[in-house]
Amino acid sequence: MQQASLNIIIADDHPLFRGALRQTLETIFDQIAIHEAGALEQVGEQLEISEDIDLVLLDLSMPGVRGFSGLLYLRAQYPSIPVVIVSASEDVPTIRRCMEFGASGFIPKSLSIDAIAQGIRAVLNGETWVPESIDLSAPYSDEITELVERLNTLTPQQVRVLMMLSEGLLNKQIAYELSVSEATVKAHVSAILQKLNVDSRTQAVIAAAKIEAGQWQSISVKN
């Protein structure tokens, strides 16, 4: 890839890691504009302000994110912008699920600068990338495959509502947080239940938890 001006968002809630990754990127690319975000909401703000973002480097664990929900939201809301997960996890099921939810790549934080450069360049060239040592060929159960497909049908707002359901928020609390009416929230909840093929809010959260490898808490919420 030709060295060109790049706009990249680093989304991680640890300032020290953001600084280290910024230095790494500035070492790799001669001309680059780096934007930092410490929460998912800030990522959205950056994407709304800048129309020429080339790549988002997203941590799985940060404020406003539960498990894969941040990736789900960004892929649904901004489908044309590639998202690469940069995570301390090197768990193969987690990496595979990230890729199935639309990530363009997965970069473990333990990788060398050369490997990080290889991954980012591959994604910027339109490829998908995971470390060569990662084997993603192991089959899933039919139940997990179906749940992944169903979660991929949620709209950005439905993803946000499901995140809030998992936190135990009531409809009126969700309505306040999203600045919408309770009727709108009820409509979103009904759509979520239908898309996930479940009968209650509790079952929706549990269904999501099954594919989150323990990252999306399986907690009880009011029906």
Image (cartoon, rainbow, N blue to C red):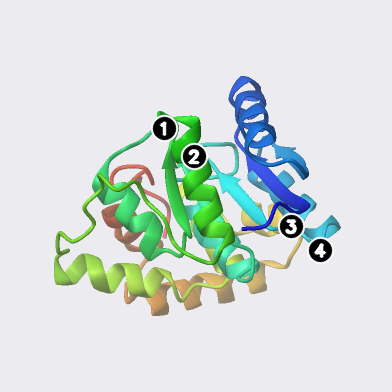
Residue 31 at x, y percent in the picture: 78, 44
Residue underneath mark 3: 53
Residue underneath mark 1: 111
User: How dense is the environment of label 3, judged by Cα within 10 Å: few (below 14), some, or many (20 and up)?
Assistant: many
Which of pointers 4 and 1 indicates the residue nearer the eye? 1
In the structure shown, which secondary structural element does the residue marked by tag 3 occupy?
Answer: loop
Label 4 is placed on what type of residue? Answer: Glu
Query: What residue occupies the far front of the structure in this picture?
Result: 2
Residue 93 at x, y percent in the picture: 25, 50
Real-space CA distance between mark 3 and mark 2, rounded to the nearest whole angstrom: 19 Å
Q: Disc number at residue 30? A: none
Real-space CA distance between mark 3 and mark 4, rounded to the nearest whole angstrom: 6 Å
Label 1 is placed on what type of residue? Answer: Leu
Earlier residue among tags 2 and 4: 4
Which of pointers 3 and 2 indicates the residue nearer the eye? 2
Contact check, label 3 and label 4, Cβ < 8 Å: yes
Label 3 is placed on what type of residue? Answer: Ile
Q: Quadrant of the C terminus?
A: bottom left
Real-space CA distance between mark 2 and mark 1, rounded to the nearest whole angstrom: 6 Å
Asked if one can make out residue 98 in the rendered structure from this viewpoint, the answer is yes
Residue underneath mark 2: 116
Earlier residue among tags 1 and 3: 3
Real-space CA distance between mark 1 and mark 3, rounded to the nearest whole angstrom: 24 Å
Real-space CA distance between mark 2 and mark 4, rounded to the nearest whole angstrom: 25 Å
- Of 104 and 188, nearer the camera is 104
> Which residue is depicted at the point 36% across and 64% down?
100
Query: What residue occupies the far top of the structure in this picture?
Result: 16
User: Would you say 212 lies left or right of 34 here?
Assistant: left
Which of pointers 1 and 3 indicates the residue nearer the eye? 1
Residue 35 at x, y percent in the picture: 76, 41
Asked if one can make out residue 161 in the rendered structure from this viewpoint, the answer is no
Contact check, label 2 and label 1, Cβ < 8 Å: yes
